[in-house]
Image (spheres, rainbow, N blue to C red):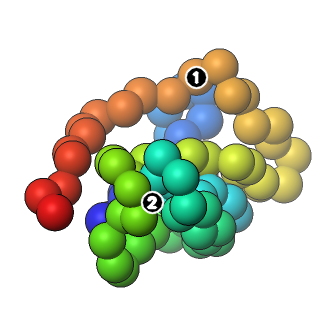
Amino acid sequence: MSVVLNVKDEAGNAIPGATVNGRFLDDYWLNKTVVATTDTKGTAKFLHIGPGCVGAIAFLVDRVASTGRTFDRTRGVLSKWVIPPQ
């Protein structure tokens, strides 16, 4: 499973160099933490190799850090979701 995350400011501008902490989760066992830094376009990419242990795999953003900024947990847009075949 791959996740592409775009980090933007309030005006919609990309934030390069932000550290994004997240995790891949499933219904029972999978809880894989991952960290990435956004590129010059504000994009961070994450990859989980292997099957979900039980059920669908989800991705949760735990933290986004960039100097002088605060992560707003009340905003975000899900652009795509997929339940992979077994």
**According to the image, label 1 marks what residue?**
75
Residue, far bottom: 49
Amino acid type, label 1: Arg
Q: Which of marks 1 and 2 is nearer the N terminus?
A: 2
Give the residue at x 40% y 73%.
48
Q: Looking at the image, how many numbered discs can be counted on the residues? A: 2
Give the residue at x 34% y 78%.
50
Specify whether 84 is left or right of 78: left
For the C terminus, the quadrant is bottom left
Residue, far right: 68
33 or 12: nearer the viewer: 33
Residue, far top: 74
Residue, far left: 85
Q: Distance between the residues labelled 1 and 2?
A: 17 Å
Q: What label does residue 25 carry, if any? A: none
Vertical comparison of 63 with 85: above or below: above
Specify whether 42 is left or right of 50: right
Give the residue at x 21% y 47%.
83
- The image position of residue 18, as x and y in percent, is 67, 60
Q: Considering the numbered disc 1 on the image, is that residue within a helix, a strand or a loop?
A: loop
Category of crowding for the residue at label 2, using alpha-carbon neighbours closer than 10 angstroms: few (below 14), some (14–19), many (at least 20)? many
Residue 6: in sight, yes or no?
no
- The image position of residue 73, as x and y in percent, is 69, 28
Identify the image quadrant of residue 33.
bottom right
**According to the image, label 2 marks what residue?**
43
Give the residue at x 39% y 56%.
54
- The image position of residue 51, as x and y in percent, is 31, 71
Amino acid type, label 2: Thr
